[in-house]
Amino acid sequence: MKSNKTENLVLEELPSSSAAAASPEARARLRRFTIRAIMLTALFAVPLWQLARHAWKTEVQSHILLIPFVCWYLFKIAKEKEMGTPRPSPISGCIAAVVGLAALAAYWHWGINGNLPRNDALSLAMTGFLGLQLANAFFTLGWPVLRSRLFAVCFLVFLIPLPLAFTEFLSIMLQRASADAAEYMLSLVQMPFLRNDLVFQMPGLSIKVAEECSGVRSTLVLFITSLLAGHLFLRTGWKKALLALVIFPLGILRNGFRITAISWLTVNVDAGIIDGPLHHHGGPFFFGLSLIPLFALLWLLRRSDFKANRR
């Protein structure tokens, strides 16, 4: 009898929650949000088009083209029953609006006049666009609706092009760390060499770990992939953080392995390998290899989640 009463209570609560989510006020707020979002998108049509062209031509920022589709998928899979009743969050909306307007003012002052590189100008424009869109969401829908879709909302930040100063810093950091990893791996395979900063002298071969070899683009793609995989397949916060943070040492080891493999093969197998496709077009191959330990770690973390749930 108690179980029947419990089931009746659950069945009685379900229509009320769904009715609240589909109430006339909720539908009206959703319409207002949609109309304002379309208007903001139309106002930012030019910088959005410039962003698409920039991402198409720039390897480091090419991931931007996929972000809208990923976010659409994340919004789509969000469970309808998790949506709260729309209720404005004016304080959060004001904060988002101030950030958006400040970024937009900076874009108008420095970006349009050409005082900033196009990449950084688009960073300001997209920060303004997303800030105003977020303010629109807070003023019309509020935290009760956004909370269940918080990851998808935060994932939109990858629409903002990374500033050139940041990508240059990350590239140099990965470049030097990759050279250190290559030095260690070359020692493991007993390859005779002399190192002078980023230059390695080996029998019949001299190479320099260039900034282009830092793998900054593939590292960023792996980082975004790890965030998405952690959200979809893991439940514990620290496991999601571990999966994301392991990307940077994994990227360094991948680059060190690539340098070591190409150098060893050039010296011991074929001197033409250094000028062959493995060197100049082997990035996707080594990127694929780096996915193996990443997915292995994901599998182990997911398995531990299942074991914890069974207890």
Image (spheres, grey):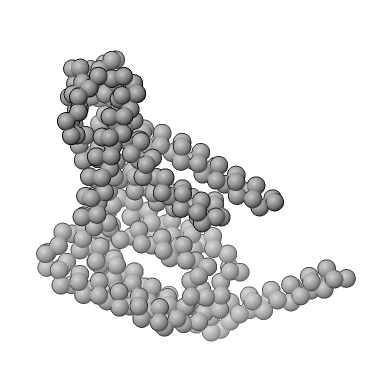
Q: Position of residue 47 (x, y in %)?
A: 24, 65
Determine whether, in the image, residue 305 is placed left or right of residue 250: right
**Residue 35 at x, y = what percent?**
40, 77
The front one of 251 and 144 is: 251
Residue located 21% across and 55% down the image:
164
Residue at x 52% of width, y 79% of height? 86
Name the residue nearer the viewer: 56 or 78: 78
**Visible residue check, residue 259:** no
Tell me residue 166's x, y (percent): 24, 54
Across and down, in percent, residue 117 comes to 16, 59
The answer to whether residue 256 is above or below residue 40 is above
Q: Nearer the viewer, residue 191 or 73?
A: 191
Instruction: Tell me the quarter of the picture where residue 101 sits.
Output: bottom left
**Residue at the spot 74% in from the left edge and 72% down from the top edge:** 10
**Quarter location, residue 84:** bottom right
Q: 190 left or right of 305? A: left
**Image position of 153 with respect to 16: above or below:** above
Identified at 46% across, 49% down, the residue is 242
